[in-house]
Image (cartoon, grey):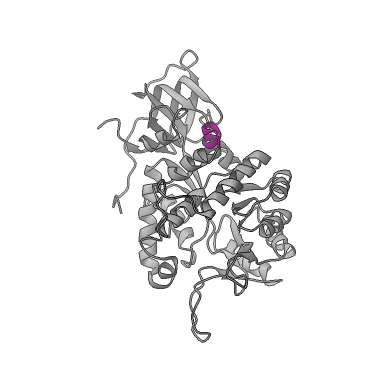
Amino acid sequence: MLGCCFQALAQPTNLILKNAQVFDGLELQETWVVIISGDTISYAGTVSDAPEIEGREFDLSEHTILPGLIEGHSHLLLHPYNETSWNDQVLKESMTERALRGANHAEKTLRAGFTTIRDLGSEGAEYVDVMLKSSIEKGVVPGPRMISAGRAIVATGSYGPKGFAPHVKVPIGAQEADGDKIIQVVREQIGHGVDVIKVYADYRWGPFGQAAPTFSTAELALIVKTAASSGRSVVAHATTAEGMRRAALAGVSTIEHGDGGTQEVYVMMRDNGVALCPTLAAGDAIMQYRGWKKGIEEEPPRIKNKKHSFRLALEVGVRIAAGGDVGVFAHGDNVRELEMMAEYGMPVMDVLRSATSINADIFGLEELGQVKAGFLADLVVVKGNVRTNISTLRNTVMVLKGGDVVLNKLDT
């Protein structure tokens, strides 16, 4: 891990960040002052209205302060598939190894300015993600705030490593459930401490290996109803139009990937308040792992289709949750998804809103996602102007989580 005995840097009661440009989660503000008292933002506004208060001051001219970024689709217990295939990670890496990797990935994510993540599936590691969240909360290891999904729910026979003889039993990387058994499985996961339920509404189990729907609309609705009774939402992996349609009708909160989205489906999602988490960077990474030379060779059909699908969602007005499926590519490189959202046609300011206030709203994080008095002091400071270049988010010089300074390059 990057640091064996994590402790936040000692600091006075108040931190005063001044002369900075501030993206407050909604708009870009010029030359604001942000004051942090304990774990909370006590003031964020103009210099003229700022209270006189003692504390440690940082002059952040030529810097931008943003809310701590929120990663909408992560897998801390996975690492890039060009290092080790998904099958081998599930079948050959011990729970201990995966937990240690996860702790390392958590610290990299936090230091990159992502102070909250939605971790959508342990991928064969049972409830290690829930335990990692607990360890971060206890201060055992550094990492972001976590929304954990535990074991994803899949239809029997649809998921997992394939190609083994019938008598060979292998871990499938998720939890199977069908029909009325769905109620028991959802409740079991809730009992293990998950924050959100993830379901695969389709998967690559068609007659020719193509993606096809798994659960019926009624089964998906039963998952949503059972989760909702405990105050939890449901997210759906769905890449086909029919899988997306069923998931939207069932009442999931977000659809992950959405490669096959059509105008009809996107209108349904928009009208039913279902957000899209597009995971653009995952497909981009996978195609490069398979040999595509990005920027040199013509874009493969998968990339062209993804661009079309994403732009169609923007045109229709579907809410976009920023999330890259990190773990398919390297943790700490989370900005890659935000760069691609801009590259694929989303205005930079909308990308920033998606990764802060919009994600906070979709995920029910009432005290996060904005630089605003009374909100938790989860902040990231970058050198430069984010309005002109989204990649400025890579120039991280300071990260605060709950008022604790977890990264500070300004004093070096």
Quadrant of the rendered structure where residue 289 is?
bottom left
Asked whether residue 368 is drawn in magenta, I would say: no
Is residue 339 placed above or below 255 in the rendered structure? above
Q: Residue furthest bottom?
A: 167
Q: Is residue 195 left or right of residue 17?
A: right
Q: Position of residue 87 (x, y in %)?
A: 44, 69
Q: Residue at x 37, y 49 (%)?
A: 107
Q: Which residues are magenta?
A: 346-353
In the displayed structure, does residue 354 sit left or right of residue 385?
right
* Residue 391 left/right relative to 70: left
Q: Horizontal and vertical percent for residue 77?
A: 43, 60
Number of marks: 0
Depth check, front residue: 174 or 327? 327
Point out the image quarter for the C terminus.
top left
> Measured from the top left, where is residue 268 in percent x and y?
73, 48
Classify residue 130 as left or right of residue 56.
Answer: right
Is residue 378 something one can see in this rendering? yes
Q: Is residue 364 visible?
A: no
Quadrant location of residue 57?
Answer: top left
Split into 4 quadrants, where in the image is the N terminus? bottom left
Residue 52 occupies which quadrant of the picture? Answer: top left
| Looking at the image, residue 45 lies above or below residue 321 | above
347 falls in the magenta region: yes
